[in-house]
Image: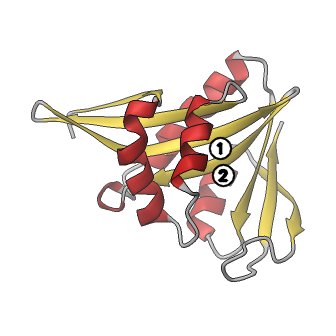
């Protein structure tokens, strides 16, 4: 891996980011919702771009909604071929850094109860479990763990 750059996502990234979304989630956002998230001033969407052998490829993203003095992480995904090498952690660290620099020092998220890898990552980054949302995920009614980092 030559170089990873994490930057703000733009509408020009929509197709690549949406393909990562579809490959990563059983219940992906609609493409128009994704486009709205990229354009909205109330969200922050970061893209991870891999530069290898002179070629650039989008390999992951993180998204958050900005609400008053807190932020809500709405999505984190890494392309299947690039998982388990620390990209999710890099994206989250960059997201948390940017949120902190912008004055958002309370960050929340929901994560599938069965997604132990993500729960472990969030705990490593300082998030703590604070509750559950019963039947949160519509595709299988799985509960979500609510986590906060303050």
Q: Residue at x 67, y 48 (%)?
A: 74
Can you name the residue that lies furthest to the front here?
Answer: 32
Q: Residue at x 69, y 44 (%)?
A: 73
Examine the image and state in which quarter residue 51 appears.
top left
Residue 125 disc label: 1
User: Disc 2 designates what residue?
Assistant: 122
Examine the image and state in which quarter residue 116 appears.
bottom right
Residue 43 disc label: none
In the rendered structure, the answer to whether residue 5 lies left or right of residue 7 reads left
Can you name the residue that lies furthest to the bottom here?
Answer: 140
**Residue 148 placed where, x, y %?**
82, 47
Q: How many discs appear?
A: 2
- The one of 25 and 93 positioned closer to us in this rendering: 25
Q: Is residue 80 above or below residue 41?
A: below
**Residue 143 placed where, x, y %?**
78, 75
**Residue 141 placed where, x, y %?**
75, 81
Q: Are marks 1 and 2 in contact (CB under 8 Å)?
A: yes
In the rendered structure, the answer to whether residue 147 lies left or right of residue 29 reads right
Task: Count residues near mark 1 (Cα–Cα under 10 Å), then give few for <14, some for 14-19, many for 20+.
Answer: some
Q: Is residue 140 above or below residue 92?
A: below
**Residue 150 placed where, x, y %?**
84, 36
- The one of 138 and 117 positioned closer to us in this rendering: 138
Q: Residue at x 56, y 48 (%)?
A: 32
Q: Is residue 139 above or below residue 77?
A: below
């Amino acid at each position: 891996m030559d170089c990873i750059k994490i930057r703000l996502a733009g509408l020009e990234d929509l197709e690549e980011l949406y393909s990562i979304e579809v490959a990563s989630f059983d219940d992906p956002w609609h493409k128009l919702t994704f486009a709205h998230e990229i354009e909205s001033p109330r969200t922050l969407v970061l893209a991870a771009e891999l530069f290898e052998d002179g070629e650039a490829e989008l390999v992951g993203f993180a998204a958050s909604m900005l609400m008053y003095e807190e932020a809500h992480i709405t999505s984190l995904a890494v392309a299947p071929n690039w998982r388990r090498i620390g990209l999710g952690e890099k994206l989250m660290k960059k997201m948390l850094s940017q949120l902190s620099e912008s004055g958002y020092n309370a960050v929340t998220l929901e994560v599938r109860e069965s997604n132990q890898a993500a729960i472990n990552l969030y705990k490593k980054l300082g998030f703590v479990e604070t509750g559950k949302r019963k039947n949160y995920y519509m595709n299988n009614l799985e509960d979500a763990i609510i986590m906060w980092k303050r």
